[in-house]
Image (cartoon, helix red, strand yellow):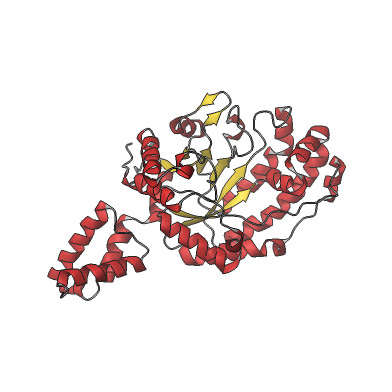
Amino acid sequence: MLMQPGDQFQIYLEIMVSRLGMKVTTPWFAFHFALGSNSLRQNPGFSTSPYLHIKSVYNNRMNKRDAVLSLLDENQTPEYTPAAFFLHFGEPYQRGQAAIDRHLEYFRHTGMDFVKIQYENPFPYLPWLLKPEDWANMPCYGLDFYAEPLKVVEGLVKAAKSEALVVLTLYSPFMFAGQTAGDELVTRHIAENPDAVARGMQVITDSLLLFVKECARLGLDGFYTSTQGGEAGRLPERALFDQCIRPFDLALMEEANRTCRFNILHVCDYRLPYANLSPYVDYPGQVVSAGLELTTGRLSPAEVARQFGRPFMGGLDRLAVLARGTPAQARRAAETALSTAPARFILGADCTVPADTSWDNLREAVSAAHAHQPVA
């Protein structure tokens, strides 16, 4: 059977769209493709470069960098609701070019609105660190320690920054201390001798500041700054948090804010829930992400956005249908969350989703967000 001119055009169109990393499933794309087809027939200038015409339509309508950054302008209503979900890739995809390629594959498959680099270079466990006084000997790792994650940052900035913001997970000094000695031991040491532990926290912070500055030099757009330590029952009193966690969090986050334009404060409830989020309200970051389930009840995204005075990211339970349901169920869950979301909102999960979560589930949730028109 002979192929009709329209069929040839459609195939060529799909090839060009594929080269741009775009999808042809959403209604507005179909609409613009129809317009593009007419333009190509009627305008000789377009007929010589349909690829450039399609690229122009795409860039004008769906620039992911501008869409996400528009959330930071209180006087601007975003064109659509951005979305992003994060998961850890397997061991073969955590370093080098394999990590770069996997992040890009995931970013393009899900259609999410920024590239989020998973940090996969934990601090070594130090078995000799047994007493609070041992923190005085905490080693300060130099930039050579961070060589592998810096390669991934550099590669993804080069590959994706032109189309989307590129951010990196940055764990807090307290969380790196947990990698060094174990969460329970760190918590016990803080309660026994906070002055001694604070000395170790300063060393960890000094090391991480080197890393943050180098990431900024490489062109990273920002950090997903993950913090813990203020959960319900973690420490016996708030004063210990204020001495051993808060000042080191702030030193790191303030440097990130100074050097990068887009940082997400993530109040992480992966280990324990919170009684309230008040210890973090004045932490830096252009966007806040937090779990909504507290020991005292459930918050709404709008309530968290008002409390922190900035856009909220989240709305979905990382362990519910998003991770264990079907793509259709994930989409319905996203639509439910979006129905009560504030205008300045990024759809996401309350933390990293399980590694075996279906990418198609996440793509459907992202697609639901993109179909949602925020209302001021």
Query: In this orientation, which residue lies closer to the viewer: 258 or 269?
Result: 269
| Residue 156 location (% of width, % of height) | 52, 63
Residue 266 in which image quadrant: top right
Q: Measured from the top left, where is residue 4 in percent x and y? A: 15, 72
Q: Quadrant of the N terminus?
A: bottom left
User: Would residue 135 appear left or right of 349 to someone viewing this image?
Assistant: right
Residue 36 in picture, x, y percent from top left: 20, 64
Which residue is rendered at x = 66% and y = 65% of the image? 147
Res 322 quadrant in image: top left
242 or 52, which is in the foreground? 52
Task: Quarter of the image for the C terminus: give it.
Answer: top left
Identified at 51% across, 62% down, the residue is 102
* Horizontal side, residue 38 vs residue 245: left or right: left
Using the rendered image of the protein, determine whether residue 302 is visible from the camera's viewpoint: yes
| Above or below 47: residue 59 | above
Q: Position of residue 270 (x, y in %)?
A: 60, 39
Q: Nearer the viewer, residue 125 or 166?
A: 125
- In this image, 42 relative to 297: left or right? left
The answer, for residue 255, to whether it is visible in the render is no
For this orientation, the residue located farthest to the front is 1
Looking at this view, name the residue that lies furthest to the left.
42
- Name the residue at the top extreme: 296
Task: Report the label total.
Answer: 0
Instruction: Answer with the quarter of the image where residue 277 lies.
Output: top right
Q: Residue at x 54, y 62 (%)?
A: 219
